[in-house]
Amino acid sequence: MLFQARFVLICLAIAIILFSLTSDAIQAISRRLKVPNWLATTLALIGITLGLIWLSTTIMSQVNVVIGRAIAYAESVQIALSALIERFGPEAETRLMAALTEFNITGWLRSLAGQASGLLSGSLLVILFVGFMFAERTWLPVKIERLTGDPAQAMRMRTIIATIMRRVNRYLVVKTFVSALTAVTVWLIFVLGRLELAAAVAWLTFVLNFIPNIGSVIAWGITVALAFVLTGDPTTTVVVGATCMIVHFVVGNILDPMLTGQTLQLSSFGIILSLAFWGAIWGIAGAFLAVPIMVAVMIVCWHVPWLRPVAILLSREGLADTETARP
């Protein structure tokens, strides 16, 4: 079911995250600016609509630019690769050239462009989901109380939901800052190296950094490949690749864990397990959503007695939720 309904479920998960991110903002706007709640909700929905459409069209255009430029440079890259492979001897040259011939890079790039084009239709469905969530938000506390039949239990359930939303929101804010910092640094490296596609590489780096652990590796690999495609010079490629590797290492292994460690309290093995599971079911979108889903699952399991061992295994120190847990 998760696999067959993946498009709708992915859009629903993204809509829930956007709803969580904007709920606090709506309350702050209503309270500080003293505007009606319906007006603040309408403004938030308009902002989400414009933001999603802009983001999806920007990502599609940048991916198409990168793919089109890579296909245009395919012939020059093949010549540069042939010159580079000759240094390894005739036997290695034959094997490597045979492997490169079997690898249809052009077809893979075109299929990637086709997948990127689905962002716009998904964005429209997300906007529709978020709009109806805003419309139903007023009745959520009443539904929870009637579902549980106990005001105290309903209050505890609302507290758990608020904890999940708060922790996921913190993670997304921190991850956005870290990804933006990495993307700007990579953009500066390309600009200083006088390489084309600096903006496109920065966008891809920003987006891929939301994938835990392996996202920065994929972004670095794309950066190195594009540097070689654009220059055909192994020396320039090594310099750009080494510089970007230092950036990804410092941000990914020092700054990112320092900022997100106290926020998530997730086991590293649990993150890899969640990434593998949701990536296998939902592909790239599942890799993006793996951490928020894992946070929600861990906190819920912590408050269900017979599932608490799962939460302990998924947490970093065996304490999945110290904010709402009873002594």
Image (cartoon, grey):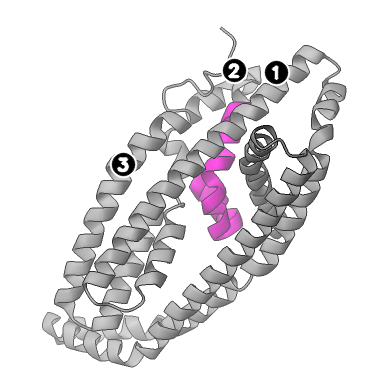
Q: Is residue 140 left or right of residue 200?
A: right
Q: Position of residue 73 (x, y in %)?
A: 34, 88
Which sits in the foreground, 93 or 106? 106
Secondary structure under tag 2 reads loop
Percent position of residue 125, x then y: 73, 60
The residue pinned by badge 1 equals: 156
How far from the left and from the top, in percent, is residue 7? 69, 60
Asked if the residue under mark 2 is in contact with the one under mark 1, i.e. CB atoms within 8 Å, the reply is yes
Is mark 1 in CB contact (under 8 Å) with mark 3? Answer: no
User: Around disc 1, counting alpha carbons within 10 Å, would you say few (fewer than 14), some (14 to 19), or many (20 or more)?
Assistant: some
As rendered, which of 191 and 290 lies closer to the eye?
Answer: 191
Q: Is residue 258 magenta?
A: no
Cα gap from disc 2 to disc 3, whole angstroms: 28 Å
Residue at left offset 49%, top offset 39%: 171
Can residue 301 be seen from the camera position used here?
Answer: yes
| Residue at the (65%, 55%) spot, across then down | 47
Q: Are marks 2 and 3 in contact (CB under 8 Å)?
A: no
Asked whether the viewer can see residue 5, the reply is no
Q: Which residues are magenta?
A: 273-300
Q: Which residue is mark 3?
A: 255
Disc 2 designates what residue? Answer: 324
- Under mark 2, the amino acid is Thr
Q: Earlier in the sequence, mark 1 or mark 3?
A: 1
Alpha carbon of mark 1 to alpha carbon of mark 2: how far?
Answer: 8 Å
Measure the alpha-carbon separation of dots 1 and 3.
Answer: 34 Å
Check disc 3 and report its element: helix, strand or loop. Answer: helix
Task: Characterize the local packing of mark 2: few (<14), some (14-19) or many (20 or more) Cα atoms within 10 angstroms.
Answer: some
**Which amino acid type corresponds to the residue marked 3 in the rendered image?**
Leu
Q: Amino acid at mark 1?
A: Arg
